Image (cartoon, coloured by chain):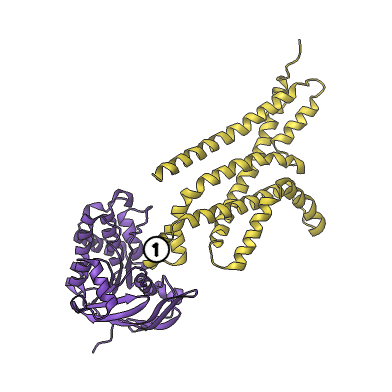
Chain colours: A purple, B yellow
């Protein structure tokens, strides 16, 4: 047995008196795709944000790639180069064009030579169908295009783990597919380990190696593959799936 | 026929003396704006840190310079520094110092406000690609904050230039003080000279501040357009 890439044990998160996450435990092996499902406010996004230091947690332990997470800012800064994150609101830097958005991490954070990085980025842009947009500014792009660039910006750091936080939630329906296809391709290649928060159930069913169902900050179900969709165990999960009508 | 008094402007070296005074005014304003802006940007960044005692001290500094009238500040520094602390500085230096401290305090608030107006999401997106604190400031926050703070900065500049007219009170030989001297020297022979002298001083200030004010207007318009 190889050690898992990500190991989360007994994670507890409070926000003042509110108990946001309660005793969260799971493991994620290299190349696996884990989807986090659950009703709004169940703590999915918060859990994701705890995994790259955007939120602090109060108890529990995270081990990433054999390294114990200390929650020190310096360590997060290191770890974030290996844990990419894509947000619901894309959050491209409006003052930088597409290429500059993507290059910022590899050049300034990882201090890699531009000549080595450029071909990789052109490759990635081609993969997401955005090769002609290197000089465009974010305001000139549609939501779907921005999100594809945001994915490339995160991938450009060559992370070992990618976190996707409801990346299609603010997109027009016709743009959702393009973005999901990129993640599908990534999942199919088994080259990337991913944690995905989504409300797209068909998509979740296709890509999941493991499903975590979260409600009120607790993991209610933890199942491999598509089992969750076919035989949900708890009533909460059954109601949740019924409400998603897919 | 009554003497119009316009000759006062050109008599002797009057005009070049006025220009010399104008130069003193502009020099003090420029140096104060330059130093004040640099210090103010640093203080503004520090004021966005979560450190409470530091924020309190910087806030106190801002409020002191904002509440106390500039005249009082000038007198404080000009008369009390030498007397109580035995620090003797030339009037022009005191003036530059007071103005720089004032600009720095106002700038710190402009910079803080502008930095805090950059959406939190931008900060998180920068952190998520591994940027350090200063890299985040340099590549993400400051470039986005600066168009937000620029109109207020230009407005502050015009206020600084106008307020230099108080410098005569601590005997800096600025354009107002020189004008006053010329008026007094010519009061008997050309009682109407006062209109011409103040007229030309008005023009001087107008020539400096009008472009700034136009720039301010332009920036505000551009910002509104960018928001649409």
In this rendering, does residue B25 appear at all?
A: yes
> Disc 1 marks which residue?
B126
Q: Is residue B90 left or right of residue B156?
A: right
Label 1 Cα neighbours within 10 Å, binned few <14 / some 14-19 / many ≥20: many
Of residues A92 and B180, the one nearer the viewer is A92
- Tell which residue pokes out farthest to the top in this image: B1
Q: Position of residue A66 (x, y in %)?
A: 33, 84
The correct choice, above or below, for A68 with respect to B110 in the image is: below
Image quadrant occupied by the C terminus of chain B: top left
Q: Position of residue B61 (x, y in %)?
A: 66, 58
Q: Going 41% across and 70% down the picture, which residue do you hit?
A: A54
Q: Position of residue B139 (x, y in %)?
A: 42, 58
The image quadrant that residue B25 belongs to is top right
Of residues A223 and B166, the one nearer the viewer is A223
The correct choice, above or below, for A9 with respect to B42 in the image is: below
The image quadrant that residue B85 belongs to is bottom right
Letter of the chain that mark 1 sits on in the rendering? B
Q: Going 53% across and 60% down the picture, which residue do you hit?
A: B45
Of residues B78 and A1, the one nearer the viewer is A1
Of residues A163 and A134, the one nearer the viewer is A163
Image quadrant occupied by the N terminus of chain B: top right
In this rendering, does residue A130 appear at all?
A: no
Q: How many marks?
A: 1
Q: Position of residue B26 (x, y in %)?
A: 63, 40
The correct choice, above or below, for A60 with respect to B25 in the image is: below
Q: Is residue A236 left or right of residue A22?
A: left
Q: Is residue B167 left or right of residue B157?
A: right
The correct choice, above or below, for A150 with respect to B97 in the image is: below
Q: Going 30% across and 55% down the picture, which residue do you hit?
A: A98
The image quadrant that residue A74 belongs to is bottom left
């Amino acid at each position: 047995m190889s050690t898992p890439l990500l190991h989360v044990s007994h994670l507890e998160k409070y926000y003042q008196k509110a108990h946001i996450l309660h005793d969260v435990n799971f493991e994620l092996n290299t190349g696996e795709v884990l989807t986090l499902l659950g009703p709004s406010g169940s703590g999915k996004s918060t859990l994701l944000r705890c995994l790259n230091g955007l939120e602090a947690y109060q108890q529990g332990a995270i081990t990433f790639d054999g390294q114990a997470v200390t929650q020190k800012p310096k360590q997060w800064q290191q770890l974030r180069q290996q844990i990419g994150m894509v947000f619901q609101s894309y959050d491209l830097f409006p003052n930088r064009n597409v290429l500059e958005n993507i290059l910022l991490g590899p050049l300034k954070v990882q201090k890699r030579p531009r000549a080595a990085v450029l071909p990789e980025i052109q490759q990635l842009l081609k993969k997401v169908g955005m090769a002609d947009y290197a000089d465009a500014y974010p305001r000139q792009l549609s939501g779907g295009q921005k999100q594809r660039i945001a994915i490339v910006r995160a991938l450009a750091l060559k992370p070992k783990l990618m976190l996707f936080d409801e990346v299609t939630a603010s997109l027009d329906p016709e743009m959702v597919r393009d973005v999901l296809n990129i993640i599908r391709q990534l999942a199919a290649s088994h080259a990337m380990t991913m944690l995905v928060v989504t409300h797209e159930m068909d998509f979740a069913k296709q890509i999941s190696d493991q499903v975590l169902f979260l409600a009120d900050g607790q993991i209610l179900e933890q199942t491999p593959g598509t089992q969750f969709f076919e035989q949900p165990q708890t009533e909460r999960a059954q109601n949740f799936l019924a409400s998603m009508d897919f | 026929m009554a003497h119009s008094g316009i000759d006062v402007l050109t008599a002797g070296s009057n005009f070049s003396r006025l220009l010399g005074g104008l130069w003193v005014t502009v020099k003090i304003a420029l140096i104060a704006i330059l130093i004040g802006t640099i210090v103010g940007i640093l203080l503004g960044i520090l004021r966005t840190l979560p450190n409470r005692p530091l924020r309190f001290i910087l806030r106190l500094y801002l409020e002191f310079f904002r509440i106390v009238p500039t005249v009082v500040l000038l007198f404080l520094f000009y008369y009390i520094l030498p007397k109580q602390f035995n620090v003797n500085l030339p009037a022009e230096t005191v003036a530059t110092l007071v103005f720089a401290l004032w600009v720095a305090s106002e700038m710190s608030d402009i910079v803080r406000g502008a930095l805090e107006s950059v959406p939190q999401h931008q900060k998180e997106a920068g952190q998520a690609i591994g940027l350090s604190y200063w890299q985040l400031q340099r590549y993400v926050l400051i470039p986005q904050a600066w168009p937000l703070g620029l109109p207020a900065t230009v407005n502050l500049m015009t206020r600084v230039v106008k307020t230099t007219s108080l410098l005569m009170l601590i005997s800096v030989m600025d354009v107002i003080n020189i004008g006053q001297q010329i008026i007094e020297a010519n009061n008997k022979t050309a009682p109407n000279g006062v209109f011409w002298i103040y007229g030309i001083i008005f023009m001087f200030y107008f020539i400096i501040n009008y472009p700034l004010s136009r720039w301010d207007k332009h920036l505000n318009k551009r910002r509104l357009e960018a928001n649409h």
